[in-house]
Amino acid sequence: GDLGVVAVGFSGGQPKAGVDAGPAALIESGLLSEISNELGYKIHGDQRVNMYEELVPASDPDYRGMKNPRTVSAVNKRLAAEVYEHASQGRLVLTLGGDHSIAIGTLAGSAKAIRERLNREIAVIWVDAHSDINTPESSDSGNIHGMPLAFATGLARDDNEEYFGWIKDDMLMSVKKLVYIGLRDVDAGEKKILRDNGIKAFSMFDVDRHGIGRVVEMALAHIGTDTPIHLSFDVDALDPMWAPSTGTPVRGGLTLREGDYICESVHQTGQLVAIDLVEVNPSLAATEAGAQETVRAGCSLVRCALGDTLL
Ligand code: DIR
Ligand code: MN
Ligand code: MN
Ligand code: MN
């Protein structure tokens, strides 16, 4: 198949340095050569990490409580256009982050392209310890990586082009087509948003109760068969045992096998249109081995989503 690759060295959606080096670490460990040589994809895009430095404004004061709002908005506007271009050509789009604020751009780009090309709404499977659906007003941190789904669904909006006002209706996704797996650290304000909007979520409690096989089956049943799927995978969904080198680790997470299983199952639907792999921060592990483990886990998730099989 044809694969559009976008490597986004961006950290402005959260305060910790180093997550901008995530895509380079994934690529240096051989991910893209495995994808083309072993999985047989034709890769489109320049395969270099884009830091988008030219888009960073001279001054970027807080706005509605958001930190680095103009930077995050400008980078995502550009990213949305890149993802849109790949998806419009019928390519599966792989975006390597970077912090999870970059899903504002990837979701906007794929939602618009799939709407135009297939006349369909995308469904989103969000695999994460966190629900990332704070509005600027509900957020305690002001970090935009905790807000991407509020902007992607239209729950948060702004008229000003410089503050995400470029997200038009044809770039939005429906809250009905969103499903979470792996949640275990959800803010009180976010719980209210999930309840008020009837958003489907499978927490770690559900994974423990039903097992990952049944949870994935229920998640796919919720979005319906024959629906284009955008998989957004935050590496912190995995337990820190498997992915310690990430900005906001939370204990009690998915095993690497459970994460791989989700990706394998989504691949098997044949409906995957986009994948994000985010929040790999090679500088945060206590040991070099911990950083390498996290990179290897990220590579494994991506390979599984692209159809690497055990047998
Ligand atoms: C928290 C943490 N809910 C926030 N979010 C994180 O800042 O809004 N997302 N860590 O990945
Ligand atoms: Mn997270
Ligand atoms: Mn996240
Ligand atoms: Mn296959």
Image (cartoon, grey):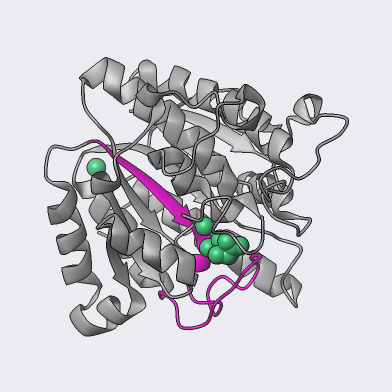
Q: Find the magenta span and give its range.
A: 228-254
Residue ID at (36%, 21%): 113
Percent coordinates x, y for residue 77 in the rendering: 59, 26
Answer with the quadrant where ligand 1 appears in the image: bottom right
Residue 66 position (above or below residue 294): above
Task: Give whichever of 291, 116 is nearer the camera.
Answer: 116
Specify the quadrant that holds the C terminus: bottom left
One can see residue 97 in this view: yes
Picture quarter containing residue 233? bottom left
Q: Is 246 a magenta residue?
A: yes
Residue ID at (68%, 67%): 291
Residue ID at (47%, 65%): 189
Residue 285 position (above or below residue 55): below
Residue 285 position (above or below residue 125): below
Percent coordinates x, y for residue 152 in the rendering: 43, 39
Percent coordinates x, y for residue 84 in the rendering: 45, 22
Magenta: main secondary structure equals loop
Task: Give whichever of 78, 51 is nearer the camera.
Answer: 78
Picture quarter containing residue 7? top right
Residue ID at (52%, 31%): 5
Q: Is 6 a magenta residue?
A: no
